[in-house]
Amino acid sequence: LVAFFQPKVLAGRKVVITAGPTFEALDPIRGITNHSSGKMGFAIARAAREAGAEVALIAGPVSVATPRGVRRIDVKSARDMLAATQAEVPAADIFIAAAAVADWRPVAEADQKIKKDGSGEVPVLRFTENPDILATVAQGERAKSRALFCVGFAAESHDLVKHAKAKRERKGIPLLVGNIGPLTFGQDDNQMLLVDEKGVQELPRAPKIECARQLVGEIARRLPR
Ligand code: CTP
Ligand code: CA
């Protein structure tokens, strides 16, 4: 019932959201990934849908139920996530990058499982940098003209305000969200710090779905009419 009575502040808008971790394969058995439950991105998808938006949710490997009325596209690696995002954003009004994208991937994926050879020698892994999905989208013409409103998240372990401000400028986006306090992986509560061109604003601590609704409201009032 609460969901039904959310103000329809995003009616007629299309929202694209990335969520969850990415998985970068090393061989058919193993890979590297990030710590992320996907709960925050999924909560934002639900809140955006409640607010009347058409929502495409691009999800890395997570086990969270798809919110009702949300179109979900499953991906694995950062490169898959970039391709899926680029297919969706041309028709979107809002892009929210809530995914915990792996910054690096192994240079090559072995076709077969890498086996121990019995000598005790360990493999030496080489990495290459993944594409920055948010920065790539934010550099597009529609994003620059604010026809596509881009929102980023900052995962920081220290100096949140300083890093979040710098990250917003570096990515060239109007709004960046930081998580305040202890890292909130997998938890149901969250508290957000919003960084925009005017400065820094703290939102109240609340369950993730409430935080998501607050964020949707904050995005809606920053949109061009
Ligand atoms: N992001 C992305 N693609 C990447 C890396 C990050 O889209 N390859 C997005 C995240 O979804 C998030 C924002 O960029 O919205 C910031 O991610 P974060 O990991 O905090 O920042 P990085 O730019 O990767 O820098 P670092 O990890 O070194 O702090
Ligand atoms: Ca990163």
Image (cartoon, grey):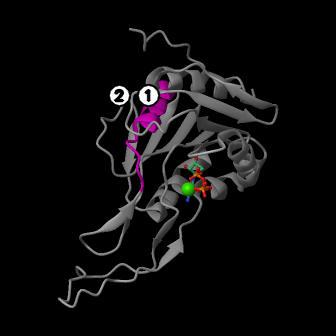
The residue tagged 2 is: 68
What residue is pinned by disc 1? 46
Q: Is mark 1 within 8 Å of ligand 1?
A: no
Q: Residues within 10 Å of mark 2 (few under 14, many from 20)?
A: few
- Is residue 139 placed above or below 174 in the rendered structure? below
Q: Is residue 176 visible?
A: yes
Residue 169 x %, y %:
77, 49
Q: Position of residue 214 (x, y in %)?
A: 57, 21
Dot 1: element: helix
Quarter occupied by residue 19: top left
Percent coordinates x, y for residue 188 in the rendering: 39, 27
Q: Quadrant of ligand 2?
A: bottom right
Residue at 74 percent across and 40 percent down: it is: 174
Amino acid tagged 1 = Arg
Q: Is residue 47 magenta?
A: yes
Residue at left 52%, top 59%? Answer: 82
Q: Which disc number belongs to residue 171?
A: none
Q: Nearer the viewer, residue 113 or 14?
A: 113
Q: Quadrant of the N terminus?
A: top left
- Give, as a single range, the part of the protein colored magenta: 34-52
